[in-house]
Image (cartoon, rainbow, N blue to C red):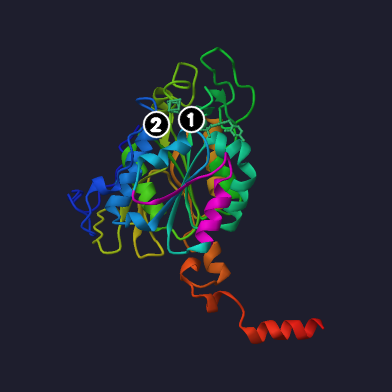
Amino acid sequence: MADSTLKIGSGTVPTENRLGLKATDYHGGKSTLCAGCGHDAISNQIIRAFYEMSVKPEKVAKFSGIGCSSKTPAYFLSRSHGFNAVHGRMPAIATGAILANHRIVGIGVSGDGDTASIGLGQFMHMVRRNIPLIYIIENNGVYGLTKGQFSATADEGSKLKTGVINDLPPMDLCALAVELGCGFVARGFAGDPKQMVNILKAAIAHDGLSVIDVISPCVTFNNHEGSTKGYTYSKEHDELLHQIGFVQEYEQIEIDYEPGEVRVVEMHDGSRIVLKKLEEDYDPSIPIQALQRLHRATDQGQMLTGIVHLRPEKKSFTSMLNTVDEPLATLPLEKTRPPREALDKIMRDLM
Ligand SMILES: Cc1ncc(C[n+]2csc(CCOP(=O)(O)OP(=O)(O)O)c2C)c(N)n1
Ligand code: SF4
Ligand SMILES: [Mg+2]
């Protein structure tokens, strides 16, 4: 696996962020997951990304469904709002909350079971609507919480500890998200924190849905020989699409690469994503290229990671609806119901 860091700026992490908060202000409760679970590594990078981006914890709302992965919002950002939904129903809850308050930064954490099985319908409609939400799938190929049955993302031919072989083809949630028109689709690996934190920062800056499928090994049920979602297998098969750098809008950008070697994508908030090409001719803004590359990766047994598809200009659902900017709960009564004359007119028209 190549080094996945594109170094930009000084790279030093200050002890306080621009809000004067410490990294500990972004921590959560103590994890109860198995030691070494990939999900904990992802929580650590979520803490780091929100801290380094100086997002006020009280501005964030965390959502999840059911599973070991869905427990993790309890382990980061304890000062933020949170809602633990029924299995597979997190998208509906997140959609409602975000429509009621455009100003919150929404982050959803789901599992491959929660998203690709029971929650698939909700997931697809959330993608179609482009709800502004960071949607993370902690993908270990199994239902960890219910003791390791294959999920719909398990690779064909992969083996359970008990020797059972998976005969069904995997569902690629990145390909599905591209197909449904998502403007930000990425795949990460819990064992590559440097890449992960930059993907998360880019997602925080994105105005729209970002689908981040993270290969996150389950050390208890799916990390053995024969598994294709364990640490060893994933490290050996990780294929980087590009190196990712992230520059916040107030930072200077210093790039000393040949023209054409680096692609800079400006985000809604003025920050920039810097992608150093590792593959000739790959353009992440073209959906058909993303789909082709994902299919090729599956055919060649590669675990392709990076920002697979990026269209920051796509309109999010909240901007399409053109509703008020203020949180609905803060609106005075006279703004939320029709005036007496309007009601009288309706009554007259009905008579
Ligand atoms: C309606 C309903 N059906 C089934 C279950 C049982 N169940 C709990 S978690 C889970 C799957 C979790 O798998 P995943 O989302 O991949 O999370 P992981 O534990 O692997 O992180 C299932 C089937 C449930 N809680 N509710
Ligand atoms: S069972 Fe698997 S997914 Fe669940 S906490 Fe343990 S290692 Fe993580
Ligand atoms: Mg799982």
Side (left or right) of 7 relative to 74: left
Residue 348 located left or right of residue 16: right
Q: Do the residues under discs 2 and 1 have CB atoms within 8 angstroms?
A: yes
Residue at point 58%, 29% (across, down): 151
Along the line of sight, the residue nearer the viewer: 41 or 327 = 327
What is the magenta range?
79-99
Report the residue marked by disc 2.
38
Whether 297 is among the magenta residues is no
Residue 18 % position (x, y): 23, 59
| Label 1 CB sits under 8 Å from any ligand 3 atom | yes
Residue 91 part of the magenta segment: yes
Note whether 29 is above or below 264 in the view shown.
Answer: above
Q: Mark 1 highlights which residue?
A: 140
In the rendering, at what x and y percent does residue 234 appear? 42, 28
Mark 2–mark 1 distance (CA, rounded to whole Å): 8 Å
Q: Which quarter of the figure is the N terminus placed in?
A: top left
Q: Secondary structure at mark 1?
A: loop
Quarter residue 44 falls in: top left
The amino acid pointed to by label 1 is Asn
Any mark on residue 206, and which?
Answer: none
Location of residue 41 with respect to 321 vertically, above or below:
above
User: As displayed, is residue 163 above or below residue 17?
Assistant: above
Q: Residue at x 53, y 40 (%)?
A: 294
